Amino acid sequence: RYLKTIDDKEKQYNVCLNTFLETSNKFANERGKLEELIKKSQGDSQECEKRAVKAEISVLQTWKETEIWKLKGTIAKAEGNLRKLQKALS
């Protein structure tokens, strides 16, 4: 009678152990997948950040070039006015 009880308990233990091991393996696999997704997401995020910085630099360079072009136009007008004044004075 005790041997049968021991055998039954051992079978129950083995069933529980197998269930635990299967569940543990599933969670380990899922964790590995999630870690890979996190790494990929971090890489994607860094790539997006680099693109955003490049875009911002491009906008600032364009703005700078536009302002320089405006200043050159203002300088050209001022030089033209100066020549007119010099002509008028002579």
Image (tube, rainbow, N blue to C red):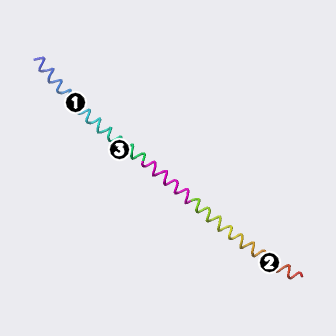
Residue 43 colored magenta? yes
Image: 79 above or below 20: below
Q: Residue at x 75, y 72 (%)?
A: 75
Crowd rating for badge 1 (residues with CA inside 10 Å; few <14, some 14–19, many 20+): few
Residue 50: where, in percent of width, then height?
A: 52, 54
Mark 1 vs 3, N-terminal side: 1
Residue assigned mark 1: 16
Crowd rating for badge 3 (residues with CA inside 10 Å; few <14, some 14–19, many 20+): few
Image: 42 above or below 1: below
Q: Mark 2 and mark 1: span between their CA atoms?
A: 96 Å
Closer mark to the observer between disc 1 and disc 3: 3
Secondary structure at badge 2 equals helix
Residue assigned mark 3: 33
Mark number for residue 61? none
| Amino acid type, residue under disc 2 in the picture | Asn
In the picture provided, is 56 more to the left or to the right than 7? right
Residue 33: where, in percent of width, then height?
A: 35, 44
Which range of residues does the magenta coloring cover? 40-55
Residue assigned mark 2: 81
